[in-house]
C-alpha cells in the first residue's frame, strides 16, 4: 500500500528532553489517520514536522514521496499546494475578509482570473455550509464554529489530496462538532481526501478515524483501527485511561458492537 | 475509482472535431487545479471558441480527474449553465450538481458616493474627538487610581514601577548617549564655522548651553523615548488585549489602569528627566570636544563658563518639560494600546499611530512651553 506520509525513525529532542524516540508511521492513501496522546506527548510537534514547520532532530519525513527536509524549494512549493491545513484556531488572516482569506491561495497561483476565483470561493463557502452574505465579514466578527468552517474552506481552496486537521472540534459546542464531523466525512468522500488529524475529542476520534496512532512515552505504542487499539488497552495504562475512562466508555458505546467483536 | 487514476495523469487537452454539421469538443487528461494552472492560458481561447457554438457537443468522458476548479472553468465557459449537449462520466456528475444553484455574487462593492470627501473629513473629526475623550478618560482613571493609592499606600505597584523605570530609562541610556553626542558635535561644528567669521568664538558656550539644555536635550530624548518605549508600551498592551490578558486581569479584580497604565506613567515621569539630564551631559561633551577641535576652546574654560552663560532656570525648565513629556508619552502609548482591536492589522496601525502622535504631541507641548516661559532663563 502506498504511503502518502512516511515517517522513518524520527527522533525529536529539545535540549536533553527527548520527545520522540524512533517513530515510524505510514499514512495510507484515502484513510483518516488520527494521532492521539496525552498533553505534552508531542502530537502537535509531530504534526508540525509532517508539515515541515519543524525539523526533527533525526529521521526523515516524506510526504507524497518527497522528503520534507533536503528537497529543493520548487518541489516543496508544489508539495505545499497539494495539502491543506486546518489550524486549531483557524489561523484566518485577521486583516482580510472571509472572501479574501479563501481567495488568497488561489490568487497566489497567479494564473486564475478574478471571475473564476470568485466562483470557486463561493463554491467552497457553499461546501462548508457558509452563506454567501458572510463573505465580506472580517474574521473577528465570526463565531468559533464559523471560523473553523471558513478555515476548512481555505484549506480546501487548492483542491488538496491531503488534509491536516489540528483539533478540528476543539472549542465547538457538541452540536457544532457533530455537524463539523459530518462535514469532514462528507467532504472526505467527495474529494477523495487523505486526512491526518490530531484530536483529544473521543467522539470525533471514534466517528472519523479509520486508523489511530497512539503516541505515548515518546513512541507510537500502537497504530491500528479502533478495535485493534482498544484490544491492547489492557497492556497499556495510557490507552486504558484514554479509552476506558468514563468518557471513553461513553464514546465507545456508540460503536459497542464493533468493539465486542474483538 | 481511486485505482483508476493513473500515477501520472496527462495534461489537460482538448480536441475539436465535427460530426456532420455538429461541432464536437472532446476533453481529456487531468482537469484539476494543479494541472490547469500551467495550461490555462492556451486552453481558455480554445474553450471559448467551442462554446461560441451552442450546438457544440461536449465530450468529457476522457477526462481522468475533474475537480471544482476544472469544473468551474467549464461551467463559466458554458455561460454559467450546463452545456446543452454534454457527455460525462457518472462520477463527475456530482461536481456539477453543486453549481446548479449558482450563488449570486455576494460581495457588495461599495458604489461611489459624491459626499465621500465630506464624510471622510467628518469621520476624521469624530475620531479625533473620540481619541481625545478616551485619552482623558484613561487619564482620569489614572488620577482616581493615584488618589486611591494615596489612601492605601500598601497597594502601590512598586515592582511594576521600578521595572518600567529600568526598561524606559536605564535601557535607553546607550541610544540617547549616541544620538546626543552626535547632535552636540554637529551643532557645535556648524556654529563654530559661523562664529569664526565674526570672531565670536566664546559664544559657542552660550549657543550650545542654551540650545542643548533648554530645547534640544529634552526634545531629542523625548522623541527617542517615544519611539522606543512608546511603541513597546502600545504593542504590549495591544497584545494583552488580543490575547484577552486584560480581560483576565479585570475579572481577577485587578484594575489594569492601576497595574499597567499608572506605573508606566510614573516610571516615565521619573526616568524622562533623568534621561534628559544624561542626554544634555553627553551632548555638551560632544559639543565641547568639537569646539576644542574647531575653535581651540579649552575643556576647563568651557566647563567653568557654562554656569555663567546658561542661567540655571533653563535646566529646571528642561527637566520640567521632561516630566510632562514622560507623562504624555506614557499616556498616549497606553491610550493607543488599550484601543487596539483583536487583529494583527489593528496592532500595527495602533503602534504606528501611537509613536507618531506622541512625537507630534511632544513637539506641540514644547512649543507651548516655549511661549509660556519666554521670559524665563534667557538673559
Image: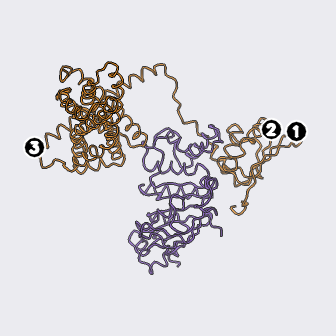
Chain colours: A purple, B orange
Earlier in the chain: of badge 1 and badge 2, it is 1
**Residue B167 in sight:** yes
Chain bearing tag 1 is: B
The lab-note entry on whether marks 1 and 2 share a chain reads yes
The Cα atoms of the two marked residues, 2 and 3, are separated by 90 Å
Given the current orientation, which residue lies at the most extreme left position? B151
Q: In which quarter of the image is residue B103?
A: top right
Chain bearing tag 3 is: B
Say whether marks 1 and 2 touch (CB < 8 Å): yes
The Cα atoms of the two marked residues, 1 and 2, are separated by 9 Å
Query: In the image, residue B116 lies at what x, y percent?
Result: 46, 22
Label 1 crowd bin: few (<14), some (14–19), many (20+), radius 10 Å: few
Numbered disc 3: secondary structure: helix
Q: State the residue position of label 3.
A: B151
Tell me the number on the disc at residue B55: 2
Q: Quadrant of residue A27?
A: bottom right
Earlier in the chain: of badge 3 and badge 1, it is 1
Amino acid at each position: 500500500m502506498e504511503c502518502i506520509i512516511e515517517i522513518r525513525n524520527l527522533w525529536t529532542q529539545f535540549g536533553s528532553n527527548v520527545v520522540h524516540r524512533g517513530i515510524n508511521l505510514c499514512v495510507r492513501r484515502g484513510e483518516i489517520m488520527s494521532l492521539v496522546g496525552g498533553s505534552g506527548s508531542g502530537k502537535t510537534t509531530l504534526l508540525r514536522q509532517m508539515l515541515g514547520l519543524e525539523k526533527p532532530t533525526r529521521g526523515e519525513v516524506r510526504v507524497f514521496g518527497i522528503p520534507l527536509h533536503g528537497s529543493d524549494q520548487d518541489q516543496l512549493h508544489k508539495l505545499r499546494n497539494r495539502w491543506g491545513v486546518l489550524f486549531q484556531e483557524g489561523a484566518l488572516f485577521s486583516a482580510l475578509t472571509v472572501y479574501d482569506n479563501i481567495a488568497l491561495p488561489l490568487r497566489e497561483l497567479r494564473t486564475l482570473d478574478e471571475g473564476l476565483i470568485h466562483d470557486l470561493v463561493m463554491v467552497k463557502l457553499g461546501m462548508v455550509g457558509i452563506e454567501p452574505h458572510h463573505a465580506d465579514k472580517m474574521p473577528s466578527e465570526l463565531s468559533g464554529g464559523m471560523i473553523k468552517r471558513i478555515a476548512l474552506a481555505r484549506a480546501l481552496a487548492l483542491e488538496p489530496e491531503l488534509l491536516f486537521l489540528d483539533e478540528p472540534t476543539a472549542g465547538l459546542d457538541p452540536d457544532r462538532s457533530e455537524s463539523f464531523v459530518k462535514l469532514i466525512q462528507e467532504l472526505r468522500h467527495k474529494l477523495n481526501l487523505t486526512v491526518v488529524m490530531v484530536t483529544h475529542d473521543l467522539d470525533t476520534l471514534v466517528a472519523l478515524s479509520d486508523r489511530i496512532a497512539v503516541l505515548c512515552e515518546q513512541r507510537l505504542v500502537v497504530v491500528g483501527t479502533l478495535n485493534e487499539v482498544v484490544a491492547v488497552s489492557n497492556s497499556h495504562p495510557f490507552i486504558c485511561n484514554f479509552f476506558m475512562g468514563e468518557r471513553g466508555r461513553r464514546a465507545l458505546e456508540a460503536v459497542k458492537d464493533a468493539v465486542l467483536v474483538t | 475509482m481511486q485505482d483508476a487514476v493513473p500515477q501520472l495523469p496527462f495534461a489537460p487537452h482538448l480536441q475539436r472535431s465535427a460530426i456532420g454539421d455538429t461541432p464536437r469538443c472532446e476533453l481529456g487528461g487531468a482537469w484539476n487545479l494543479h494541472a490547469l494552472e500551467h495550461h490555462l492560458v492556451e486552453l481558455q481561447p480554445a474553450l471559448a471558441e467551442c462554446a461560441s457554438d451552442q450546438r457544440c457537443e461536449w465530450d468529457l468522458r476522457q477526462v481522468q480527474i475533474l475537480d471544482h476548479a476544472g469544473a468551474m472553468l467549464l461551467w463559466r465557459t458554458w455561460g454559467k449553465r450546463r452545456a446543452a449537449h454534454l457527455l460525462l462520466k457518472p462520477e463527475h456528475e456530482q461536481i456539477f450538481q453543486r453549481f446548479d444553484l449558482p450563488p449570486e455574487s455576494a460581495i457588495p462593492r461599495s458604489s461611489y458616493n459624491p459626499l465621500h470627501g465630506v464624510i471622510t473629513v467628518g469621520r476624521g473629526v469624530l475620531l479625533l474627538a473620540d481619541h481625545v475623550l478616551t485619552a482623558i478618560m484613561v487619564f482620569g482613571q489614572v488620577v482616581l487610581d493615584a488618589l486611591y493609592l494615596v489612601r492605601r499606600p500598601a497597594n502601590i505597584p512598586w515592582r511594576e514601577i521600578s521595572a518600567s523605570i529600568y526598561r524606559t530609562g536605564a535601557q535607553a541610556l546607550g541610544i540617547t548617549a549616541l544620538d546626543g553626542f552626535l547632535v552636540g558635535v554637529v551643532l557645535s561644528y556648524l556654529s563654530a564655522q559661523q562664529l569664526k567669521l565674526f570672531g565670536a568664538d566664546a559664544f559657542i558656550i552660550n549657543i550650545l548651553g542654551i540650545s542643548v539644555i533648554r530645547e534640544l536635550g529634552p526634545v531629542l530624548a523625548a522623541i527617542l523615548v517615544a519611539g522606543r518605549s512608546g511603541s513597546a508600551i502600545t504593542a504590549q498592551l495591544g497584545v494583552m488585549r488580543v490575547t484577552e490578558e486584560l480581560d483576565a486581569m479585570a475579572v481577577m479584580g485587578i484594575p489594569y489602569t492601576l497595574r499597567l497604565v499608572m506605573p508606566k506613567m510614573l516610571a516615565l515621569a521619573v526616568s524622562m528627566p533623568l534621561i534628559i539630564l544624561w542626554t544634555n551631559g553627553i551632548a555638551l561633551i560632544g559639543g565641547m570636544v568639537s569646539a576644542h577641535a574647531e575653535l581651540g576652546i579649552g575643556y576647563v574654560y568651557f566647563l567653568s563658563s557654562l554656569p555663567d552663560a546658561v542661567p540655571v532656570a533653563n535646566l529646571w525648565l528642561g527637566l520640567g518639560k521632561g516630566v510632562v513629556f514622560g507623562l504624555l508619552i506614557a499616556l498616549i502609548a497606553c491610550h493607543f494600546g488599550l484601543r487596539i482591536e483583536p487583529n494583527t492589522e489593528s496592532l500595527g496601525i495602533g503602534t504606528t499611530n501611537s509613536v507618531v502622535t506622541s512625537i507630534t504631541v511632544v513637539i506641540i507641548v514644547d512649543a507651548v512651553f516655549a511661549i509660556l516661559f519666554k521670559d524665563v532663563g534667557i538673559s
